[in-house]
Image (tube, rainbow, N blue to C red):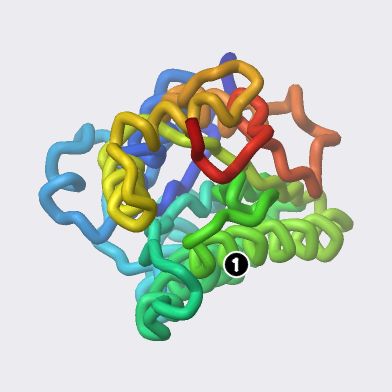
Amino acid sequence: MSLPAGHRVLITAGASGIGRAMAEAFSAAGARVWVTDVDEAALAVCPTDWGRTLLDVRDEVGTAALTDRIAREWGGLDTLCANAGIAGPTAPIEDMPLDGFRACVAVNLEGAFLAAKHAAPLMKRQGAGAMILTSSTAGLHGYPNRAPYAAAKWAVIGLMKTLAMELGPFGIRANAICPGAVEGPRMEGVVAREAATKGMTTEAVRAGYAAGTSMRSWVTAEDVAAMAVFLASPAARLVSGQAIAVDGHTENPDPKV
């Protein structure tokens, strides 16, 4: 799928994982790409024709400075992919540390809020734009032992639906992508922690995630990226306010075999 010439996209946490796959997919579709990340080494190996900014998405001053820079250098912004997120702690609720809960919510929810807050004026001025927030199937189901992550990802969907209503009159669409179990280092860590919490092997937990979907499959970062490009494209011009799962249809969010 191609995008209009000169399409401009900002992707938070875009130097690795899902964000990197999004950046590559947008670039392949002809877009100009700007990525942020907290991993300086990962940013350094991104293509030199991408904009690259070291940024913690919880930093409002830094976020405002970046969108001001994008306004100066690009003249506007067509798509925001508010993608930054962390898995947070995995534990029964009575053992869940408050600092871990707060850190998870800060990155996953506050980071998306700040990105949208500072991207909105650019899009309003041009009377068009697309905001794509990365939620999760954890934002559609309850997940045992994942209270911080699930709470934050449900809230991301609430934020998205509010943005869709608030910004729609200005020609700005907002949607959320809800990935399922995505192959990669983050889910490897989640699987290891769940295995330890439940007294299972990692292989059993992995199999449980696949068995909990009707397509019996894990998801790739490229699957998620393809949906992001679609949602940014003219083909999705009337798609807004939607939480769209890319998960092989999750039936059972509690991994079992």
In the rendered image of this protein, does residue 177 appear above or below residue 71?
A: above
Looking at the rendering, which quadrant does residue 21 occupy?
Answer: top left
Q: Nearer the viewer, residue 139 or 236?
A: 139
Q: Residue at x 80, y 44 (%)?
A: 240
Q: Position of residue 82 (x, y in %)?
A: 51, 54
Three-letter residue code for mark 1: Ala
Q: Position of residue 242 (x, y in %)?
A: 78, 44
Q: Nearer the viewer, residue 177 or 3?
A: 177
Q: Position of residue 177 (x, y in %)?
A: 62, 41
Disc 1 is placed on an element classified as helix
Q: Is residue 225 visible?
A: no
Left or right, 48 with respect to 6, comes to left
Few, some or many residues within 10 Å of mark 1 (<14, 14–19, 20+): some
In the picture, the quarter occupied by the N terminus is: top right
Left or right, 120 with respect to 25, comes to right
In the rendered image of this protein, does residue 139 appear above or below residue 257?
A: below
Q: Residue tagged by mark 1?
A: 151
Q: Residue at x 79, y 56 (%)?
A: 164
In the rendered image of this protein, does residue 160 appear above or below residue 14?
A: below
Q: Position of residue 225 (x, y in %)?
A: 49, 29
